[in-house]
Image (cartoon, coloured by chain):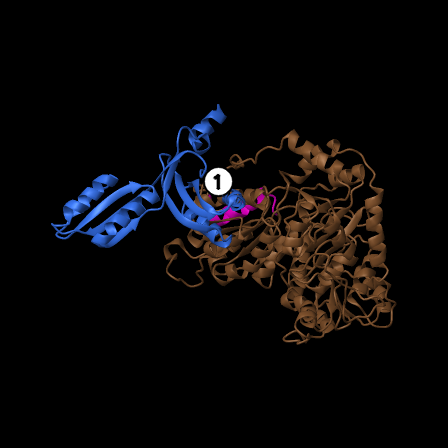
Chain colours: A blue, B brown
Amino acid sequence: MTELRTFAVLVEDVPGVLNRVASLFRRRDFNIVSLNVGRTHEVGVSRMTVVVAADERTSKLIEANLYKLVNVLAVEDITSRPSVTRDLALIRVGADAEQRPAVLQICELFRAKVVDVAHDTLIIEIAGTTEKIEGLVALLRPYGIREMVQTGAIALTRGADEKMQLHEKASREAA
Amino acid sequence: MSGHGQGETGADAIWTTLTEEGVDVVFGYPGGAIMPTYDALSRHSTHHVLCRHEQNAAHMADGYARASGRVGVAIATSGPGATNLVTGIATAMLDSSPIVCITGQVPSSLIGSDAFQETDITGVTLPITKHNYLVTKAEEIAPTIREAFEVARSGRPGPVVVDITKDAQLGHAPRTEPGPRREARRPARPLTDADLDAAAAMIDRAERPLLFCGQGIVKAEASEALTALVERADLPVACTLLGLGGFPATHPRNLGMMGMHGEAWVNEAVQRADLIVALGMRFDDRVTGNLATYARGARKIHVELDPAEIDKNVRVDLPLVGDVRAVLERLVPRVAPAKRAAWNDTLGALRADAEAHDVLRIPDEGRLLGAHVIGDLYALTGGDALVVSDVGQHQMWEAQYYKHDRPRSLLTSGGLGTMGFALPAAMGARFARPDDEIWVVVGDGGFQMSAPELSTCRQEGLKVNIAIINNGFLGMVRQWQELFYERRYVATPMMGPDFVKLAEAHGLAGRRVERRDAIPDAVAFARQSEGTVVIDFRVQAEDFVYPMVPAGNDLADMIRRPRGGAIQGGESRS
């Protein structure tokens, strides 16, 4: 069954690594929904969070193929693991003085923050699951969304995840 | 050596590191951005073979790798030199052949400026290499080349490109001793005894089991382990194209090649089997035909080094991920000794029925058939030659009629199907196997793609025997046109030069053969000659490779050779 699946991927922070991962997904016809990449606490290690539409078989192929990339350090399909998943969105919404209290009330309900106020617009910042952001967007739409930007998902599993703790794992193995 | 206090130049480091990796021959073509490296070669003992096109340099490195099991090396300049390597790299990628290609790159200060002969070759080759590197500093050259060799030969082998800027070649770097090998960071889940017991139980219970011998058997040097399994449990074996030679062709349990041009009884066996044990292969579409009807009655065990091949094309019941030889050596003692007379007799009967109208039984009527040339070449060489085949009808006749008993005795471009591969690959193989008899089996089309390398043969004093199966057509495409495009022979009739004169123009010997009874003399002449010999076999223009499973058909839905030896128009058994 095709569903949205989330992969955490630790990669060496070297030039071209994003290209290598993206190229793999393109040439194997794996369907990327979102891909997020950024630094980690470890020097030289970046973490990607890749959301794909895939079935169980394809997920295994994605993991196996990622491991074939020399710059890939660890891969985990965290779809079925308890985890914290967040997108970040910035939304510029139309709101003059009259509409502003209603918009602010919506923001409060969603625990979203107003980070910029202009004459007739607000910029709202929200972190949350994709569904939560979609919910906020739906409520703000009547006020006129002028611009919007959203990251892909980033995710960490809950509790300890040894597989993705490269440094500790390496030092344990060395000991 | 230059620059004592400063260590060696990057260019010298390239050759020093190649020598440390055991490389004594490279195949290449110089040019501006790689000139410092070529100049440095004057200070090193590595032998350089000047090919006539960089694609052939990559094929030579590939042929060397396939013939030896070691890493082959090609070298080229930036821009067109590098892009000319591309087809050779893709060929090595699809057949898991370990080669390292070193390319010159424009100075790092010019990268991104569309400088003269600048091409982003790491970008271009990204999807067709196992890995690639752009090196911009002299001190990175030695460690990068060492890592490139390790990547190329470890695990499932493959091609690696190392692109080195001109300033890195000119720069100086301290000599570095080889550090510890880069470790495989991700051992697959270790195989458990339970997995192996399960596999053995499946084999023990099977009534109609079939083993598949893929190229993994050759690469893992698992032929003995496979033979042990076959003989312990009386199991029949079918081979992929690249698996030929992995299990002796003359072994009574070897059925032959499976797939699109596999023998009828082999494909029948696949479709009737109740268990398939696939060893080091990847269920290519030329092997399976229509996946929906493929081996439906069989449970499947897949023994494969690369986890990304598991369930890629064919869903399997039990994957055993690991080195094929290591898996087999653990599996064999778990399998119960058995005799499977009924199943093997059934297969023997199917085989006898099909062999009765085999092309080799067509009497000599004065016309020359490609299959006859191959069959006779097999007999005349005693089956001991290393054969390098190109792509097309002759490749399939070779696979069917030259019986390969030893691993690495057939080299061919299986996955990519690259025409022009055979001659340069054979030349590379010559350096790996100086004492073996080598035959190139090639069509007139494919030969014309790399014929300029005859010059290289002459310059290097290389000895290979070249059998051109010359039908004046792009024969396999013509076959498809006849079968599926109502005989509209668009762009397949092909004129060639006088190949005998072409050989002679290169200072080599040539012979022409137009009748079957002239084959022995010509082959004997080639075997006795010191240098490369070209034999132009003028075969029947319109001939078929039988049997044939049309692309996408059920594997058992074959067009079979008509009884009575008619050349045109197959007989469908569907």
Decide whether residue B10 is among the magenta residues.
Answer: yes
Give the image quarter of residue A128.
top left
Give the image quarter of residue A46.
top left
Going by the numbered disc 1, the residue's amino acid type is Arg
Of B352 and A22, nearer the camera is: B352
Q: Main secondary structure of the magenta part?
A: helix
Residue that label 1 marks? B175
Mark count: 1
Say if residue B512 shows up in the picture: yes
Picture layout, residue B156 above or below residue B561: above
Tell me which chain the residue with mark 1 is part of. B
The 10 Å Cα crowd at callout 1, few under 14, some 14 to 19, many 20 or more, is some
Picture layout, residue A27 above or below residue B236: below
Position of residue B201 in the picture relative to residue B355 (left or right): left
Of B478 and B298, nearer the camera is: B298
Residue B330 horizontal/vertical position (percent):
70, 32
> What is the secondary structure assignment of the residue under circle 1?
loop
- Bounds of the magenta segment: B8-23
Residue B512 horizontal/vertical position (percent):
78, 71
Of B204 and B136, nearer the camera is: B204
Say if residue B252 shows up in the picture: no
Residue furthest to the top in view is A175
Position of residue B503 in the picture relative to residue B41 (left or right): right
The residue shown at (47%, 61%) is: B79
Picture layout, residue A69 above or below residue B446: above
Decide whether residue B573 is among the magenta residues.
Answer: no
Residue A146 horizontal/vertical position (percent):
23, 55
